[in-house]
Amino acid sequence: MEKPYILCIETSTEICSVALAHGGNCVAVKECNTNNSHAKNMIPFVEEVLQQASIDKKQLNAVAVGVGPGSYTGLRIGVSTAKGLAYTMEIPVIAISTLETIAEPYLNMADHCRPMIDARRMEVFTALYNHDGEQLEEPNAKIVDENCFAEELTNFKTLFCGNGAAKCEELLSKFPNAIFKKEPLSAQNMASIAFRKFQAEQFENVAYFEPFYLKDYVAAKPKVKGLI
């Protein structure tokens, strides 16, 4: 097969991002960071990246989607869109950890890379990767304080990235080994990961796979008087 066209969808955070990869390279991207815009923008963004690359939807070979952890609503929209496209077009789905996507551009910049997703207050979703992209720590929820990464930062230069990293910067500024990158999450960084998984045929069951929420969804209590 020639280089595959892979549609990449990332909706795990406040950013709605759609990219088109040809092989391991991004050839088109469309995104915005307006909260609660994922449902409205998803299909128009898909159509726009196809137009940017001058290809027809029928030329797609797979669809890759960020499966979290992250926003419950955002993940449902992204995964549902990916599954719908894959089912109707009879192409495979590739699931990619959002934390892996965040880390991908920075793996060679430090001994370790710690991507972080803001989970409200002082909690983050995080994992740990070395400079070869090997996952050293499974995705987990962590309460951030000034000592939670002390041992790690004593021994390794560690790059913190993602929208949860900002809340750590002041707390960890005393460690010379702490580096921070604040570029926003983007589906274009899924391109090389998606291509590797496509080559290895690491595909999901379209009917049954679900987002990786990490923590159970807890609905907010209604504030309207008289509602329970």
Image: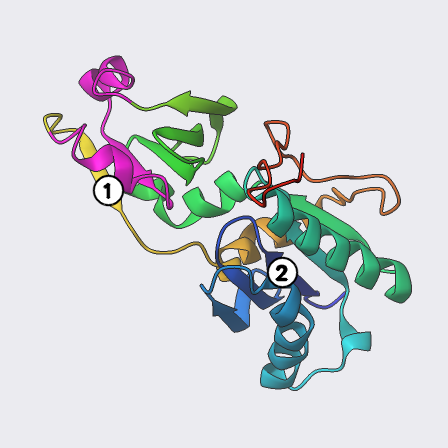
Tell me whether circle 1 and circle 2 mark residues in contact (CB < 8 Å). Answer: no
194 lies above or below 57: above
Coloration mode: rainbow
Q: Which residue is at the front of the view, 53 or 143? A: 143
**Quarter of the rendering containing residue 51:** bottom right
137 lies above or below 118: above
Q: Looking at the rendering, in which quadrant would you find the C terminus?
A: top right
Amino acid tagged 2: Cys
Residue 150 belongs to the span the image colors magenta: yes
**Crowding near pointer 2: few (<14 within 10 Å), some, many (20+)?**
many
Horizontal side of 36 relative to 112 (left or right) equals right
**Quarter of the rendering containing residue 72:** top right
Task: Locate residue 41, reporting x and y percent.
Answer: 61, 71
Q: Mark 2 points at which residue?
A: 8
The magenta region covers 145-173
Residue 169 belongs to the span the image colors magenta: yes
69 lies above or below 75: above
Q: Which residue is at the front of the view, 106 or 216? A: 216
The residue lying at 69 percent from left, 40 percent from top is 211
How far apart, in angstroms, are the residues tagged by discs 1 and 2?
26 Å
The residue lying at 85 percent from left, 42 percent from top is 205
Q: Which residue is at the front of the view, 118 or 28? A: 118
Task: Locate residue 90, reporting x and y percent.
Answer: 89, 61
Tell me if residue 166 can be seen: yes
Amino acid tagged 1: Phe
The count of marks equals 2
Q: Residue furthest top?
A: 151
Tell me if residue 131 can be seen: no
Residue 180's label in the rendered image is 1
Task: Locate residue 184, reporting x and y percent.
Answer: 38, 56
